[in-house]
Image (cartoon, rainbow, N blue to C red):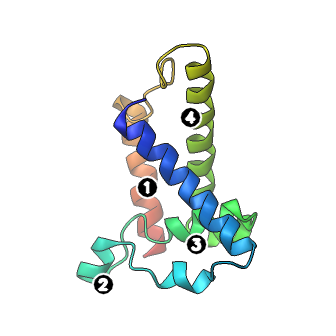
């Protein structure tokens, strides 16, 4: 597993852990909502294209899909792709292959430009 793949898996597990702790009543939602997670927002006071995504992903793990959608509309597609990619990688590792072997490069060429357009248009609609 590359450094990026390990980081992506750890971030997924951390979000799931936060959601589990919050659901169990061991962590207050206010702690997550007050944490300064966005350096762009902290520096400029403006929302970045990803503002609200962390809270939205925690909401997805808690099963609050409508809340996740209202916090950031791209949270549901992101968690779907992210989870599928991690499952793909685990299957690959069990078969003795490289983690991302056979996974399409979603950010190369036309798909990458389309993804950028979706992110920026979502951001523009939310501002």
- Give the secondary structure at mark 4: helix
Q: What residue is shown with label 2?
A: 45
Q: Nearer the viewer, mark 3 or mark 1?
A: 3
Quadrant where the image shows the N terminus:
top left
Tag count? 4
- Give the secondary structure at mark 3: helix
Residue at image position (39%, 32%) is 110
> CA–CA distance between discs 1 and 4?
19 Å
Q: Residues within 10 Å of mark 2 (few under 14, many from 20)?
A: few
Q: What residue is shown with label 4?
A: 85
Instruction: Decide: is 44 above or below 102.
Output: below
Sequence-wise first label, 3 or 2: 2
Q: Residue furthest front?
A: 26
Residue at image position (37%, 76%) is 47
Instruction: Decide: is 59 above or below 76.
Output: below
- Give the secondary structure at mark 2: loop
Q: Nearer the viewer, mark 2 or mark 4?
A: 4
Tell which of 45 and 110 is nearer to you: 45
Q: Residues within 10 Å of mark 1 (few under 14, many from 20)?
A: some
Instruction: Decide: is 105 above or below 83.
Output: above
Tell which of 65 and 13 is nearer to you: 13
Q: What residue is shown with label 1?
A: 119
> CA–CA distance between discs 2 and 4?
33 Å
Sequence-wise first label, 1 or 4: 4
* Residue 76 - label: none
> CA–CA distance between discs 3 and 1?
14 Å
Tell which of 63 and 24 is nearer to you: 24
Q: What residue is shown with label 3?
A: 71
Sequence-wise first label, 1 or 2: 2
């Amino acid at each position: 597993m590359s450094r990026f793949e390990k980081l992506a898996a750890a971030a997924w597990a951390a979000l799931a852990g936060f959601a589990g702790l919050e659901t169990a009543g061991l962590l207050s939602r206010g702690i997550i909502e007050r944490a300064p997670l966005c350096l762009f927002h902290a520096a400029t006071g403006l929302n970045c294209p990803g503002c609200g995504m962390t809270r939205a992903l925690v909401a997805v793990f808690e099963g609050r899909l409508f809340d996740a959608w209202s916090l950031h509309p791209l949270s549901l597609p992101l968690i779907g792709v992210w989870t599928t990619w991690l499952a793909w990688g685990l299957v690959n590792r069990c078969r003795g292959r490289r983690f991302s072997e056979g996974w399409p490069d979603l950010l190369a060429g036309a798909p990458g430009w389309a993804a950028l357009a979706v992110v920026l248009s979502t951001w523009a609609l939310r501002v």
